[in-house]
Amino acid sequence: NAGVTQTPKFRILKIGQSMTLQCTQDMNHNYMYWYRQDPGMGLKLIYYSVGAGITDKGEVPNGYNVSRSTTEDFPLRLELAAPSQTSVYFCASRTPSYEQYFGPGTRLTVT
Amino acid sequence: DQQVKQNSPSLSVQEGRISILNCDYTNSMFDYFLWYKKYPAEGPTFLISISSIKDKNEDGRFTVFLNKSAKHLSLHIVPSQPGDSAVYFCAARSNFGNEKLTFGTGTRLTIIP
């Protein structure tokens, strides 16, 4: 099992550009999550999904969108990148016993 | 409003000694707690968890203690090894809206050889 994979690993965007962060898991988990981690801070939940076709907002959803068309994939879309979105983004999926498995992260810089 | 707090941003411990990482929470609806370990440039990895019906859970060198009345949990690592140097996050799940975890800000543990 590859677990949770994320692409790209790094990206630099200009203000106003758009991009999609990809996340795929091969563990057949229903629950998937997107977090951001800013320096010296914990993980803040952006969006989550409890299954294909179902998504919901977390703590910090503004400026982001998600979709969940399959169990495996949970992409995160930034429509108009802003410097405040400079962060490290982690995707995770969850077992029935609530343990979350994380991808390696995407480091995004918006300048 | 930080519902899960790790008040020590960093901790240094001699190799072979005990490392104790602390976590406090404010939400009395939290009923399940987890510890994650994170190395640089990697995602967090699950380490150990504890349900609110227990006050201790042990897995090898790692033990988590829960004091519900004080709303406090701690992670003990003994003996500490150089590979334990990482950032440790405490996380909690509420029994209301239990799809999500709330994370603390992390403690950077450095094991000194």
Image (cartoon, grey):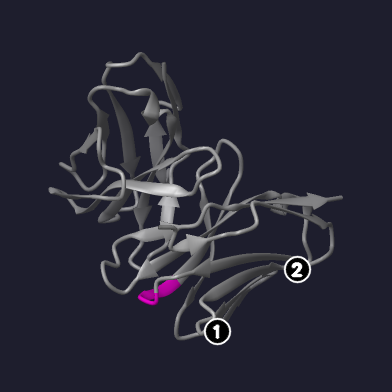
Disc 2 to disc 1: CB gap under 8 Å: no
Q: Mark 2 is on which residue type? A: Val
Label 2 crowding class (10 Å Cα cut-off): few <14, some 14-19, many 20+?
some
- For residue B39, which quarter of the picture? top right
Q: Secondary structure at mark 2?
A: loop
Could you tell me the amino acid type at mark 1?
Asp
* Residue receiving disc 1: B55
Marks 2, 1: nearer the viewer: 1
From the viewer's side, name the closer residue of B13 and B45: B13
Q: Is residue A56 left or right of residue B94?
A: left
Write down the residue under mark 2: B78
Residue B29 forms part of the magenta stretch: yes
Q: Residue at x 75, y 68 (%)?
A: B78
Q: What numbered label is drawn on residue A2? A: none
Give the magenta part as a residue range: B28-32
Q: Is residue B14 left or right of residue A44?
A: right
Q: Label 1's element?
A: loop
Q: In the picture, residue B55 is in which quadrant?
A: bottom right
**Which residue corresponds to the image point at 42% horizontal and 28% vertical from the top-left?**
A86
The chain identifier of the residue carrying mark 1 reads B
Q: Residue at x 32, y 60 (%)?
A: B100
- Would residue B22 appear left or right of A80 to someone viewing this image? right
Name the chief secondary structure element in magenta.
strand
For residue A79, above or below residue B10: above
Residue A104: x, y in percent? 48, 39
- Establish if A38 lies above or below A111: below
